[in-house]
Every structure is written in C-alpha cells, then in structure tokens.
Amino acid sequence: QAARIEFATSEPVIVSADGRERPARKGEAVITGDRVLTRSGRAQLAFSDGAFVSLQPNTDFGVTEYNFTGKADGGEKSVLSLVRGALRTVTGLIGRGNRDAYVMRTPSATIGIRGTGGRIEVDDRGTFVSGTSGTWFVSSPGGSVDIPAGSNGFAGPNPKDPPRRTSTEPNTPPATVPLAG
C-alpha cells in the first residue's frame, strides 16, 4: 500500500491498473499502478512515508512507482504522475531522506521535490509549479530550472523549450466551506 484516502468529496474514484474503478472513500488503499480521478470532487492522500497530496477537482493523479519499508534504507522511491489538474503536496521521509527518489511526472516535465511542500498544476498550456518550502526543480528534454521557495516555474508542451521561472502560479485554491442551510 502506497497511500490511503484521508478524505474525499463528490465521489472521486480510484482506477486500478486493469481499468476497474472503485470509490475513493476515506480509508481506501491506493497502491502502485492506481490512479485517482477526482472528477468534480477533491481527495487527500496520506502516504506511508508521511507525505500528503491534496487533489483539486478535475485531476488525474497516479502512483507510478512506490517503495517504502517503514525506514530510510536507500531503496525508497516515490514516482507519481499528474496527467491533468492540480494538487498541493508535502513530502514525507522519502522526499526528505533521498530527494532524488521523489519525483512527479507530468506530460511536459519531471518535477523533483528538494524541499517539503508546493503546488503543481497541469493544463493545456503546460506544467506550473510553485515551491512553498525548500527548492524544487523542473526538467524536460529542453533543460532544467531550480524553483526556490516563493518562486514559480513553468514547462510548456514543447519538450524542446527549456523550463523557466514565471510569475504565474498554479491554480490550487483551498476548498470552500459549505454553508449550512
């Protein structure tokens, strides 16, 4: 088990590697090969190494590879994917212990998280990254750029164009509180 669903709203689903869907309910396990589709809802995942990922509406997120035995022993690895949508993330022991072992892949970039938190959005324009702590990097076949805390990065859809810093932040608004009545 890589992670478990901490909470979910508006009926997101987990899609297994064989294409079967199941509800993404609180406590549901997420394993390597699974994808979480939030549709109009949201979901938060707690990983076994202490990492958290909070998925925004209309997000397609996957666990490509995950290995954590409960301690940092050099074999730990977390390879995640964000096909579309947006998320907020805080790394766990994998990202803190071996920063090269924690990466997020998108259609236009690979994001290395050399820090503890940040936000990522993928849309038709490309991949947007905002580091909230530590230093992140965004790389593509066109090059690589470091994104220190408080900065934003962008990788466009053309793999030959190098990633760059930008003033545009990922669109990851906090959840709204439902009003009673």
Image (cartoon, rainbow, N blue to C red):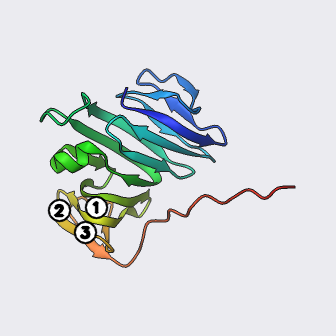
Q: Nearer the viewer, mark 2 or mark 3?
A: 3
Residue 147 - label: 3
Residue at image position (64%, 37%) is: 11
Amino acid type of disc 1?
Asn
Whether the residues at callouts 2 and 1 have beta carbons within 8 Å, the answer is yes
Whether the residues at callouts 2 and 3 have beta carbons within 8 Å, the answer is no
Count of numbered badges drawn on the protein: 3
| SS at circle 1 | loop
- Of residue 160 and residue 24, the one placed in the foreground of this image is 24
Give percent across and percent down for residue 86. Answer: 46, 55
- Of residue 16 and residue 135, the one placed in the foreground of this image is 135
Decide which of tag 2 and tag 1 comes sooner along the chain: 2
Point out the image quarter for the N terminus: top left
Q: Is residue 79 left or right of residue 13?
A: left
Q: Nearer the viewer, mark 3 or mark 1?
A: 3
Q: Which residue, given by chain and number where applicable, does mark 2 sit on?
A: 142
Amino acid type of disc 3?
Ile
- Residue 99 in the image: above or below residue 127: above
| SS at circle 2 | loop
Residue at image position (45%, 54%) is: 87
Please identify the residue farthest to the left as the structure is shown. 74
Residue at image position (17%, 63%) is: 144
Please identify the residue farthest to the front as the structure is shown. 71
Amino acid type of disc 2?
Gly
Q: Is residue 131 left or right of residue 61?
A: left
Hey, which quadrant is residue 176 in on the image? bottom right
Q: Which residue, given by chain and number where applicable, does mark 1 sit on?
A: 158
Callout 2 crowding tier (Cα within 10 Å): few <14, some 14–19, many ≥20: few
Residue at image position (67%, 42%) is: 10
